[in-house]
Image (cartoon, grey):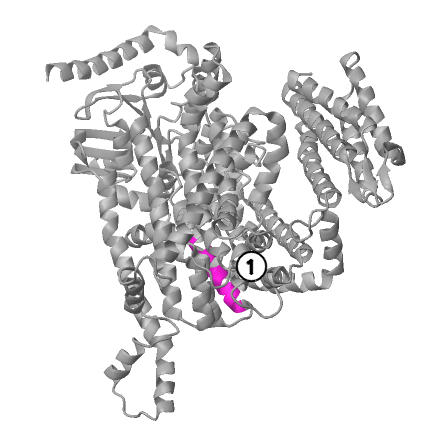
């Protein structure tokens, strides 16, 4: 039933994507047309045919809005046709960002789970920390990213660790909040049952709390991994001329290389998609192992 | 008292006792004994006396008073102290331990005896103050370089000195970029959701895409928006519009589908048309989802506006200030700006949350008490 | 007097059938159901789950479309009858809107049907009085007990003065004591308002106590196995349930249900 429903969504999704691509082309032509006319005027070219101008518009070097095929070509050029080690390769930059994301995400998740365990088992911790953790979710934490990078740089720590630290920070909060809810989600009856067995706290944790909390873990991991990626990208902004997708975005914006920006954005989107899909995959595998019906 | 509480209390008294015998700190003239600081000495003596609790029970307030006394004594030494010695750090630890004992005892009392949980707000407040005191003591007592971590008092004085600048930044970033972008983004998301609601085909196509796009690092479009809309606030508002649009779209579409089968049948028995059932049933039922998006977006909007300013702005704005002051290594000002951002973010969120409680008062999650 | 006879028939079903197409193949929810409900009747539909009693009610209400046979409501098709708002429907659960007070919930159909403010106030007061909920106008549904909520939903169904009341196991989720009380209240209300009521239940005492006519149904396929005209007097105190007459009817209903069951075994 479920797979059948998923199948039936592909048609509508493709239709919407196709419509978006058409709109994108229309937008690209509309936004870049005037510039092309101006450049003809400056060059003194006259009597350009419509089709000639259209093809010129869609192959500008620094268009206001590049057409999809230009972005794809740039993406292709900078991934497949470049050595992976090259500074121009998006694979290289993507890897830099991905490694910071993954490191930070892993630490943040483990740390978050650990803290959640303490919080559900200690009333004082719960009451001291939870209000602050919840309140901190309303704070634009990402704003401290440049400071973390620069300050750590000033004391000689640079490269992967500062970025990973920001990612840790961003993935940590959703995991704590999700897992505290998750560890508290067993029903009173289930906990009472464990009490009748005189089960220890450790047994209650592994036999009841942990399995019930797993769905919450995956949900918050999806939020956390997306936040980690954003953290790593923003962490690359103050580095200036460094590596990573964020640095590519910044370089593109300095030099007005719109096509490069869009290609970097595409790489970021692919990374995000892949990360979330992997968490989703891990979730399905776990569910199958635990015999949960999806 | 439980074992944990007794251990902590004994430890606290012991550490405070040590304060009485080790050197407290130093100036160029030589070491400073504890007798120079009567408040700390008083704290240490009383703390040792608190050991009587193992004979006669001490009231819970005693631990709070001891913690406060220790903290106050510690902060009072900071202006004269040039070099913190073992006594200084032991005082900090002892004061912290008393605060911990207090939190443990109060939390225990609330769960066990059903003391009004209103008193419970004391615990996070005490925790927050403890963190601030420790921060101040460590940064000033330990002479931590300002660049690494400024002291709360330094941040506060920087805040006071720069109020005009901070207000200008707040106006530029919050009142213009954030609020305008938020209103437009949430508004568009809502309108599009209601518009596609009638078409199952569009819903099936747009919903998975919207879910996917919500998870993308949309902040990356900031450089493009700066190119399109210029350096001033409209480009930041545009980033905010794009970031807030998708969560609102996805949540509203999902919310419009939560009205129960029975309730829909009921509307059908009244031969109610599309609009009456939308307005009287499906929109009210969707309100919790819509407010969820409004709350998520309140944080996203501020992040979007601040980060977008890292890509180029006129010389005002919270993001601009953060990136330019950090360039000058003026870290205290950066922290002051972050404090403003934090206050603005939480205030924005709580305003939305208060409106939510007023509108969705009927929802079990609101009726059930604690949010 | 065919004309007069027609005006006395509220629901008329002839050879009604309804087949659902599900993933597990076709399910015949209703098969060849023929039945009249006359004005002022209190008709109960009783049978085990899957016998199509709720489906039949939903067909009357135009919430399901029959796949065979024909049915009229007030001489019209169910769709036309629905458009004329000719019935009130009470579900298994109160289905009150939690964001509306009790009076606003009762006002809901009146708002949709475009009644004036004054008329709304008047009708809310009258129907809340009918179900004994005076004084609870400003309460929210979740502040009331389950029985009171279900009474409010009955008030909501009565508010716009439809002559036909369709009730789908309205007291199924309530405990026995509350149910007895509400049954007695419902009978009084029926006597006072002269409505025609179609009532789905799976409780034999409830069906016998309330009805002038009991339709016994059985599943796979859903069909009518017996129609019993009640001989009980119109005035029915709760202890009528211990009289031999009552027990005789209950016995016949039980026999009907058993017959439907044994049919399944011989199949």
User: Predominant secondary structure in magenta?
Assistant: helix
**Residue B298 shown left or right of residue B336 in the figure:** left
| Tally of numbered discs | 1
In magenta segment, residue B240: yes
**Nearer to me, B366 or A40:** A40
Give, as a single range, the part of the protein colored magenta: B234-246
Give the left or right position of residue C229, taking residue C242 as reference. left
Q: Is residue C181 visible?
A: no
Q: Give percent across and percent down for residue B232.
A: 55, 70
Name the one closer to the observer, C97 or C185. C97
In the picture of the structure, the residue carrying the numbered disc 1 is B306
Q: Magenta stretch: residue C48 in it?
A: no
In-front residue for pair B362/A164: A164
Q: Nearer the viewer, residue B130 or A188?
A: B130
Chain on which label 1 sits? B
| Above or below, B46 relative to B134 | above
The N terminus of chain C, quarter of image? top left
Q: Where residue B218 sits in the image (x, y, percent)?
A: 43, 57
Identify the image quadrant of residue C11: top left
Residue at 59% in and 25% down: A122
């Amino acid at each position: 039933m479920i797979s059948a429903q998923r199948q039936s969504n592909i048609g509508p999704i493709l239709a919407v994507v196709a419509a978006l691509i058409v709109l994108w082309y229309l937008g690209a032509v509309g936004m870049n047309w005037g510039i092309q006319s101006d450049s003809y005027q400056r060059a003194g070219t006259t009597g350009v045919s419509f089709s000639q101008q259209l093809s010129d518009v869609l192959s500008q070097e620094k268009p206001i809005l590049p057409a999809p095929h230009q972005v794809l070509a740039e993406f292709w050029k900078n991934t497949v046709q470049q050595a992976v080690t090259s500074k121009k390769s998006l694979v290289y930059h993507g890897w830099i960002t991905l490694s910071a994301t993954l490191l930070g995400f892993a630490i943040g998740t483990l740390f978050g789970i650990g803290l959640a365990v303490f919080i559900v088992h200690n009333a004082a911790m719960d009451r001291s920390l939870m209000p602050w953790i919840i309140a901190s979710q309303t704070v634009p934490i990402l704003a401290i990213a440049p400071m973390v990078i620069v300050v750590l740089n000033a004391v000689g720590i640079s490269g992967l660790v500062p970025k990973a630290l920001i990612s840790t920070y961003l993935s940590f909060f959703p995991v704590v909040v999700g897992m505290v809810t998750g560890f508290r989600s067993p029903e009173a009856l289930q906990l009472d049952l464990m009490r009748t067995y005189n089960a220890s706290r450790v047994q209650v944790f592994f036999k009841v709390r942990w399995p019930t909390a797993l769905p919450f873990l995956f949900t918050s991991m999806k939020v956390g991994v997306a936040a980690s990626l954003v953290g790593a990208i923003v962490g690359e902004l103050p580095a200036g001329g460094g590596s990573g997708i964020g640095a590519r975005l910044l370089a593109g914006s300095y030099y007005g290389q719109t096509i490069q920006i869009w290609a970097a954005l595409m790489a970021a989107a692919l990374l995000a998609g892949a990360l979330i899909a992997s968490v989703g995959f891990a979730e399905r595998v776990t569910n199958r192992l635990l015999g949960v019906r999806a | 008292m439980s074992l944990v509480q007794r251990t902590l209390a004994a430890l606290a008294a012991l550490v405070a006792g040590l304060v009485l015998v080790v050197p407290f700190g130093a100036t160029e003239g030589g070491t400073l004994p504890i007798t120079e600081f009567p408040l700390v000495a008083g704290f240490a003596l009383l703390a040792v006396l608190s050991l009587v609790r193992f004979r006669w029970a001490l009231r819970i307030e005693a631990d709070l008073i001891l913690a406060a006394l220790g903290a106050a004594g510690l902060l009072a030494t900071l202006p004269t102290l040039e070099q913190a010695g073992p006594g200084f750090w032991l005082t900090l630890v002892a004061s912290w331990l008393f605060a911990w004992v207090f939190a443990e005892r109060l939390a225990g009392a609330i769960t066990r005896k059903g003391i009004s949980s209103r008193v419970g707000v004391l615990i996070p407040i005490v925790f927050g103050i403890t963190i601030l005191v420790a921060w101040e003591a460590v940064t000033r007592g330990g002479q931590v370089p300002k660049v690494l971590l400024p002291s709360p008092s330094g941040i506060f004085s920087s805040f006071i000195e720069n109020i005009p600048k901070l207000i200008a930044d707040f106006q530029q970033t919050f009142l213009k970029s954030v609020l305008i972008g938020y209103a437009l983004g949430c508004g568009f998301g809502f309108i599009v959701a209601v518009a596609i609601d009638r078409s199952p085909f569009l819903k099936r196509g747009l919903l998975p895409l919207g879910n996917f796009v919500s998870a993308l690092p949309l902040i990356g479009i900031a450089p493009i928006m700066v190119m399109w809309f210029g350096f001033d606030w409209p480009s930041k508002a545009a980033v905010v519009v794009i970031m807030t649009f998708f969560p609102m779209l996805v949540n509203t579409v999902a919310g419009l589908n939560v009205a129960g089968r029975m309730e829909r049948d009921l509307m059908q028995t009244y031969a109610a048309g599309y609009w009456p059932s939308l307005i009287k049933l499906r929109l009210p039922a969707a309100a919790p989802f819509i407010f969820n998006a409004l709350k998520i977006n309140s944080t996203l909007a501020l992040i979007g506006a601040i980060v977008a300013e890292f890509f180029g702005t006129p010389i005002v704005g919270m993001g601009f200030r953060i990136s330019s002051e950090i360039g000058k290594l003026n870290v205290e000002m950066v922290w002051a700006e972050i404090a403003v951002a934090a206050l603005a973010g939480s205030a924005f969120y709580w305003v939305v949350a208060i409106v939510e409680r007023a509108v969705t008062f009927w929802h079990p999650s609101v009726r059930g008490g604690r949010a | 007097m065919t004309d007069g006879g027609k005006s006395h028939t509220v629901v008329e079903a002839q050879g009604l059938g309804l087949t659902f197409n599900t993933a597990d193949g076709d399910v015949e929810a209703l098969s060849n159901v023929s039945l009249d409900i006359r004005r002022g009747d209190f008709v109960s539909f009783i049978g085990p789950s899957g016998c199509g009693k709720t489906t039949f009610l939903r067909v009357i209400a135009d919430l399901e479309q029959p796949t065979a046979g024909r049915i009229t409501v007030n001489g019209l098709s169910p769709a036309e009858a629905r458009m004329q708002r000719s019935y009130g429907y009470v579900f298994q659960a109160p289905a009150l809107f939690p964001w509306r007070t009790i009076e606003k919930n009762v006002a809901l159909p009146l708002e949709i049907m475009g009644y004036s403010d004054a008329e709304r106030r008047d009708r809310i007061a009258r129907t809340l009085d009918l179900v004994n909920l005076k004084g609870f106008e400003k309460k929210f549904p979740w502040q009331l007990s389950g029985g009171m909520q279900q009474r409010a939903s009955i008030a909501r169904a009565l508010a716009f003065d439809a002559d036909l009341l369709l009730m789908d196991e309205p007291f199924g989720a309530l405990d026995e004591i509350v149910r007895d009380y509400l049954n007695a209240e419902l009978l009084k209300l029926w006597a006072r308002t002269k409505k025609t009521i179609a009532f789905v239940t799976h409780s034999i005492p409830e069906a016998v106590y309330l009805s002038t006519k009991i339709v016994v149904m059985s599943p796979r396929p859903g069909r009518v196995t017996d129609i019993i005209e009640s001989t009980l007097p119109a005035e029915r105190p709760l202890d009528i349930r211990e009289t031999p007459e009552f027990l005789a009817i209950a016995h016949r209903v039980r026999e009907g249900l058993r017959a439907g069951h044994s049919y399944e075994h011989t199949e």
